[in-house]
Image: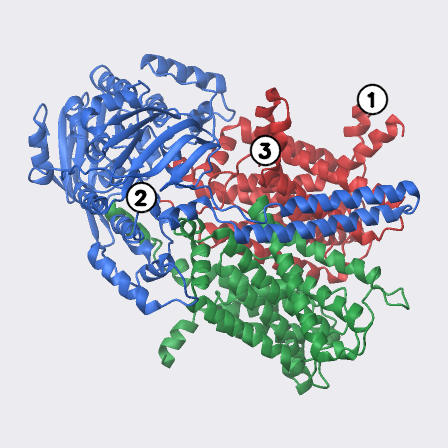
Amino acid sequence: MRVELQDIHKVFGLVHANRGISLILEPGSIYAVLGENGAGKSTLMKILSGFQKPTSGTILLDGKPAIFETPIDALQRGVGMVYQDPADFPPLRVVENHLLAYDTKFQLAFTAAADTLHTYAQRFNFHIDPQVHVDSMTLGERQQMEVLRLLALGADLLILDEPTTGISAEQKEALFNTIRRLAYEDQKTIVLVSHKLEEVLELCSEVFVLRQGELAGSLKLPATANDLVKLMFGQETERTERSPIDAGKSVLTLAHASFGDRRLTCESIDLSLRESEVVGLAGLEGSGQGLLLRAAAGLIPLKEGKLTLDDLPVEGKRSPFFWMPWVAGLFFLIRLVMLMIGRVSGAIVGLALLGGIAVAAILSATIWLISEILIVWTSESAYHQFQKRGGAFVPAGRLEEGLVPNLTLTEHMALVTPDHQFTVHWDRAETSIKELIQRYNIIGRPNSLVNELSGGNQQRTMLALLRNPLRLVLLEHPTRGLDITSANWIWDLFQERRLEGTAILFMSADLDELRERSDRIAVFSGGEMVGLVDANEITVEDLGHMIGGQRA
Amino acid sequence: MSDSDLIKILASILAQSAPLMLAITGETITERVGVINLSIDGSMLISAMTGFVVALNAGQALTAAGIPGDTLPILAGFAAAALIGALAALLVAWGSIRLKQDQVAVGFVLTLLLADMANFLGQNFTHIPGPSVAHTPIPILKDIPILGPLFFDHDLLIYSTLLIVASAWWWLYRTQPGLQLRGVGERPQSAFVRGVPVNRLRYLYTAVGGALVGLSGAAFSLDIKLGWSDNHILGIGWIALAIVIFGGWHPVRGAAGALLFGLTKYIATVLQQSFPQVPVVLFNALQWLLMMGVLLMVGSDISKRLVSIAPEALQGPLSRMLRVAPPEGLGQAFLED
Amino acid sequence: MNTRTFLQKIWPSVPILLAALVITLLLLIVSDNSPLVTYEALWTGSFGSADRTLSTLAFWVPLLLCSTGLLVTFTAGLWNIGVEGQMVMGAIGASWIALRLSAANPAIPGWIIIPVELLTAMGLGALWAALAAVLKIRGGVHEIFGGVALNSLAIIFTNYLISGPWQPPEGGSFRGTQPFPQQALLPLLDPSRFSPLSLGLALLALLAVVLTLRGTHWGLRLKALGKNLRGAFILGVSSEREAILAMMFCGALAGLAGSVRVLSWFDSLRQSISGGIGFLAILIVLLAGMRPLWSLFIALVFSALLNGGTIVQLRTQLHSSLSGIIQGTLVLFVLLFGDFDRLFGPNQPQSEVMEVADE
């Protein structure tokens, strides 16, 4: 199918996301759409896949104009999209996930669906078990499943949004082979949205580069990486270099630590960080590196092993009243025994026994309640202990975990200021936040609500709110969704912190970032730490293989 | 106690639990599609009142017109109750989908309001006799040993309830529309991408669930707890909401929860008869203690500890049985486009 | 604020008030009652005479106390449905002191016994609220379910006390305990059941809550907790501790409200001690959108409605739930249509623009 986009415009409020983009996609080719964050590539793909309607402009399919009201309209005309976060249903079984909105048969045909899946999977060398639950699969497998589903539904044009983020080297290889076969054997059109130049150079036949909502140009491949970079940024940019720093004494130690959640357990992990050291955590989404980060912050409890910060254990403050609930139980038992003795000796008759038990139960429940209140009152969570000792945790979900939506910047400032006083000094908080807004280049005012800020500014706000002095900072995807300039800026900031002795532990799905920013990289696969390597001595290639499970 | 006594008791527990099963099934469907209808306590109250009053008046009118009999009036009563239940549920759905308001707040205020309305509008119909669902044993089937008296010696309401629970299970787990229903509740954005009309389904199934809740209200006033009085069945709706959680958002397990609840109530009644000296009010406390106990079991780590005692082979299935996550999209509004 | 902006702010509530009025009118007509007679009775019943006005004020106090407490829990994002039960437990606590301590030792003067009563009431109310909080934190029981169950349990407990251990010596009646001794009751403004002292306490509580929420670190932490529990925790707020504290604070005020009910409105522990005040307070705070001054005013209007409702009931034989319907309808309408932009304005929320811009 030949697809033509003519003069596509998309306006959101004041933002002109796409400004008159025209391009042609031929069958049997693999295209890449490149661009910085905010260049408008996601918007363009959402329009092509029917997720959003263009403000103006036309889409021609084999020369005929098409208007997509919804993604399903687009799919019926042969345009299918694999989202970065696949449009599947993690709690369902694979076969159910495949069948959902697949056909119009009233009763679900499980066997037939499993067969279809099997046939397609075999053709592309995928291994998919129809009976497992989607949430037990890796991101790569979920992507494969989506590709199969779209093909089974008759997609002629497949759009893949950042398909190689968070998948293993093997899965990437399988995916690329599939893409090539689809394009060159089945004459399908493939569009890859990506920011990884090497992959684009390896796979695609033509590249469209977007800049500030416009089509900056296109380039037939093969070409050199430098040509591409020039087209994308107008000039070549280099990531700022990391200066080597002598690591000082040990800050964080995890010794024989075991931890886990419902889906994954990590056993006996050893890791230690010294002052000024940067350690990156690599691995597929959900391989244990995220758990490690949270365990190191004290956010999930260790089942075994030890966590120390500056040689002091981080295990939360146990309440001095921890024994009190047992007293409640003991009290009840003693009352019960006394009542029984009374019953046997005849001092208590009939209903008095029941009444006595009820009274004992109420009294011991009261003791239990009071002890629980005291316990909550006097204990401290491991995470808050970690925080007080100079640790910090910066989560990936900015508005979900990192900040409090509908509170202003000033209120955030007052919130993280240690409160030795009862009342808030609002003017003092405002002065400090004004300073930080200046220093961290945040586009916002002290009384802006954090949810009104853009993602990049939210990220900077989270960093601005980090306390001083900072011994250790744990970062989940510190630069995800940011363009190179913003990412560089943020890493410069950490560089300053490093000079002050702060140790940094971060996870990222970007192998280049991991390699360039870390001193050492801990690689995770399936809940195991398969290697702890020197970042200067490992290639991206090897890193990819280790992520897929190969040992160092 | 002889075997036939035991069967009779079990049959009566089944009959007594039927209305609760209806409400649980209704709310399960509603929550499965992603809407929390917190108004069901008040909704059941007003539909109980409506069902009774409509049946009563329809009966009088039909008798006056020369058509005696209870069947038609009772059907009218159930229809009216289902309508009221569906309307109340739709109000919650509309408030959250169209007006983007907090489901919990709207549901909670609605439950208070509907209870007051029920008492107000039903004030002239308290403590008067009215029609009731007739006992209809199924010929032949009722003579099967054990199963006959247990399942086939009831009235139509009980049969329909069992049928509704079974069909709800079949719909949810064996049909395409049911799969789409679950998909909308789990991940509305994925469902939308696949062309499922998210908000339309939410309206539809919230209304269906609400209608079942309405039927449940009428099932009380026309069958299990006949007639109408102030706050006739206040509190049952909350119990139903708790059992939906206990049943892990599964209609059959919800029904089992209702039976369990019926059993405990029966035991309480027996205890009450054997200890007449104990103040009756204290037995009322049992259902609330039970409700909290059940929620504690699902919510806390008590169940996890219990499972770890069990033989290893059983641990997997047991923990899956005891701990089920709610639909991921529960209570989330979904913005199309 | 000049008149114009004031009117602009106020106008959305006009159609809501009208709609609530129309719905109640319809209800009255459907149930064959004259609206005029009803509304007239409502007015004379609430502010028609000094007597009735004082009675409205007496009703206002517990309502105000409960809604003040709820301001704190709602700020912390907690649905303290259990406020009704906390009030009942407060009433039981005050009655316990009055019946067991004061009645047995008539020599103890009022200025000792009354503070003891009030403190016991606050303590019991706070504990009952803490129970809901602990069930939530330790047991994963949502506070709405915990609250509903604990409300019923508290009422059942009252009924048990009245019909059992605290039965009046003459026995039999299921309606209440014997009257408390005079010195155990709050000083009343004769001839009404209004206690100026209790109003003072309520206003003081409201002032304290306003200042706490605006200007203290605790208030700020609660606000953060209410808006994003996870985020607040990550930023260093101990969510469990603050949740228990907020619940206990509210429970203490609700307990105080319960003691005001038994020690001034009634003179003994009754079956219907709460009179739905807890639920009503929830409605008030929702209607006021958590603005303290508005809740003060709305509480007064609601207590007038309820107090007038009793006269309406006497005169027109109308069911007492009428005032509940008026209030419920009002709050529901405000909840549904409170933000008129949402109904008639552009469908696109502000934040979406931002997200897209950032991509």
Say which mark, if any, is on residue B35: none
**Colour mode of the rendering:** by chain
Q: Secondary structure at mark 3?
A: helix
Q: Is residue A314 above or below residue B143?
A: below
Mark 2 falls within which chain? Answer: A
Q: What amino acid is found at the position of numbered circle 3 in the picture?
A: Lys
**CA distance separating discs 3 and 1:** 40 Å
Q: What amino acid is found at the position of numbered circle 2 in the picture?
A: Val
Dividing the image into 4 quarters, which one contains the C terminus of chain B? Answer: top left
Whether callout 1 and callout 2 share a subunit is answered no
Q: Secondary structure at mark 1?
A: loop
Q: Which residue is mark 1?
A: B145
Question: Around disc 2, counting alpha carbons within 10 Å, would you say few (fewer than 14), some (14 to 19), or many (20 or more)?
Answer: many
Q: Which mark's residue is nearer the viewer, 2 or 3?
A: 2
Q: Which residue is mark 3?
A: B304
Q: What amino acid is found at the position of numbered circle 1 in the picture?
A: Pro
